[in-house]
Image: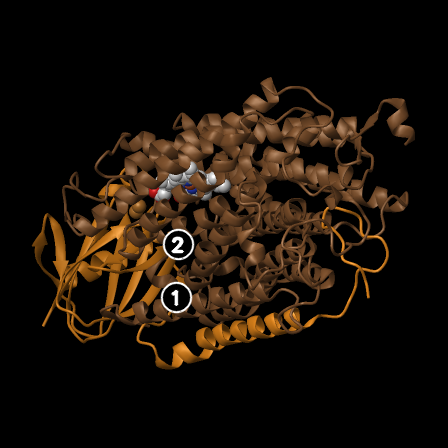
Chain colours: A brown, B orange
Amino acid sequence: MQMVMSGLARRCGVTGLVIDRSAERLIKFHAVTAVLFLALGGTLALLIALTRWQVVHLLPAKQFYAFLSAHGMVMLIFWILFFEMAGLVFGSTVLLSARMVVPGLGWVAYAMMLGGAVIATGLMVTDRATVMFTSYPPLKAPPLYYASVLVFAVGAILGVVHFFINVVAARMRGDVGSLPLFTFALAGAGIIALWSLISGAVALLPAFLWSAGVIDSIDPGVYRLLYWGLGHGAQQVNLAAMVAVWYGLASLMTGGRPLNEGLSRFAIVLYIFFINMGAMHHLLVDPGLTTWLRNINTSYFMYLAVLGSLIHGFSIPASVELGMRTQGYRKGLFGWLRRAPWGEPGFAALAVSLFLFGVMGGISGVIIGGPQVNMIVHNTLLSPAHFHMTVVAGTTMAFMGLAYYLVPLIFQRQLVLRRWATYQPYIYGAGMVVWGLGTGLAGHWGVPRRHWDISFDRVSTLPTQIFQTTVVDVFMALLGIGAVIAVIGGAMFVTIIVSTVALGQRTATPNLGRVIADAFSSAPAVAGASGEEKEAPVPAHGAFEAPGALVLSLAFLTLFVLLYGFSWFELSTVPWRVR
Amino acid sequence: MAGRFSPLAKPQGTWWSPLGRDERLWVAIAAIWGLGRFLMIAFILPAIGNEQNEIQSYRIDPAEFHRLATEFTEAHQIGEMDGVPVVAPPPGSDIYLEGQQFAWRPVVQLKRGEQYRFLISSRDVQHGFSLVMSRHSLNFQVLPGFVTAIHLTPEQVGEFAVVCNEFCGAGHHVMTGRIIVTD
Ligand code: HEM
Ligand SMILES: [Cu+2]
Ligand SMILES: [Cu+2]
């Protein structure tokens, strides 16, 4: 309150939250930077996809590998992390109506991240660091490349530390008791992020020294282990952040509240404890690990993290069902689903993200993460197909959905092109489905990832026509067509956000469409608010509170079991015995 | 009973409550399915499958591996294919396969139904050993300084392409090799 009057903060006209002005500015910078990186990464995506579509084969080899390196880095690391930093500042200040404690630290972190990201991107797109985002030694990039990534990583570590300082300070001031679930999930993401960023820095520091000529070799096996401590951990950061956004959107769009708060929080804790142990699933067909370690690491520990995801995967649709039923949509098993706000961009993004993440990304991940099945998947196109379903159709889609609300609120501008925003998630999602099916099936047929020319027409010794078949052509065409559709969807998002920020009408109370205003209120839910189709408030399906979500989840699990079994069958048809 | 709170707001009062019927059912089913997958990977498939991931490995100096691979090639060479030596080692023997920018050497000729131990390593950077069939591939990571050791038994006669599926430099897409299986 004092802050509001002194002009250091404002009270949001829509949510009633108190917003620290310096936090607001930091969120703006992170968000805009993130969206610019997304735009660059999307442009590169189109170019590399049109190259892999063998009929078009757009770029020359050198440029393809350079742009592929840049696309991976710009998207997976820069777009995602800048957006997550915006989310961390938001979750640790705005949502708590708390002050940003050490603004200087936030800005130093941002500046380091920006500097590192710009230099690394520059080196990659100009073919001076064509080592892919993984930079596996002994493939070597110039020292400046490793230095810039290290600076970025240290900046990101500082950003996460800043988040925790804000949260702890707010607690000590008594501004907050229990954290909102959204912030709690981000805190989980933050803990995993610290571990993974430190692991990445420990991998990259020797690589820097080696590239600079200070030490003369580094162990490629140890590098891979440490690198995937970063690489895999970072994916769980994305996962936890996405789950936070899912819960947030469910609440904002439908008034949904988690069915069981304790269970949802427990599932976040499962991520923290068990996910890093699954990091070795990137090394399943590497030398250096024992069979026992592979089996235990991937099967036993990882499944506790998967359990966490299964809990959220049920809990979120259940919270939507609960929210809709509370509003009065109680007809039948799925009345709530039919009447859900499908035309609201945030709900569309939530639905597309949750569905594609679960059905395509999650199931494929568990399947290919087994040590045996991984032998027919490792480094084929099935691997990028899997992670585009998680980190693109899942995380990126969810972040886009959140941005449609966060950007108007933080920038205090009317969302421009709202109509576009209602179609955007469906277009982006459809593109990703087509892309994912084409890419995934090509990978199942053995088509390698990170590969410029699967026709092998330019090979002088031992050429092969193994991939010059109609089926593979069809899959690669799906890859190309899907990419074009998805890039259109991505470009729509970038256009909407950039024009909102630049041209949107200024207002203290931006129109957010059909959101549930009490999503930000600390009071417990009250049943029986407004809505149509009011029927007797007695639960119609025995004692289950969310029978529809339960049925959906069981259907999902059935598909999971079938596909899992199918993958073992496929493995058994390989005409080689392996031991 | 505790209230339910929006995930976007600071919960006030107690948010902890025991699991309801929906959650109990789902968590139980999900946990059972997790256990099932664990049993499948750790015990069931290792007992019944023909395709096992039992990769063994050891460290080796790349120069030493190159020497062994050259010795092996000279000892068993039966001809050439596109200028690449073709070897036909006796069934059951060790096969040295070396990846380098940008080729897999030598071409290996195997007998169907016989088991061979493949010892694969790299002379320079990381490569991806990818043995491609008409609808599948078998893939193993290859690092300089390490030997990736696997036992392979071909069950089908024919010529199988080997490609590289780890980015290894400007000529990554021309890196090929060959395994020939005869009766
Ligand atoms: C319009 C959306 C997108 C399209 C069409 C697209 C397309 C592609 C294509 C064609 C590849 C190359 C696969 C290969 O040859 O190995 C690729 C790689 C990759 N993409 Fe995307 N992508 C999109 C968005 C994203 C986003 C949003 C992210 C991250 C958040 C992302 C992360 C990656 C990564 C990490 C790689 C692997 C790079 C490597 O192998 O080093 N992509 N993408
Ligand atoms: Cu190679
Ligand atoms: Cu290669």
Instruction: Answer whether residue A236 is visible to the viewer in this image.
Output: yes
The image shows residue A316 at horizontal and vertical percentages of 61, 56
Q: Disc 2 is attached to a residue of which chain?
A: B
Q: Is residue B3 left or right of residue B177?
A: right
Secondary structure of the residue carrying tag 1 is helix
The image shows residue A199 at horizontal and vertical percentages of 59, 49
- Circle 1: residue type: Leu
Measure how far apart labels 1 and 2 are at the Cα level: 38 Å
- Comparing labels 1 and 2, the label whose residue is closer to the camera: 1
Residue drawn at (39%, 47%), measured in percent from left and top? A433
Say above or below: A563 vs A465.
Answer: below
- Circle 2: residue type: Gly
Quarter of the picture holding the N terminus of chain A: top right
Residue A443 image label: none
Label 2 sits on residue: B145
Is A458 or A166 nearer to us in this picture?
A: A166
Q: How many marks?
A: 2
Q: Is residue B153 left or right of residue A300?
A: left
Residue A563 image label: 1
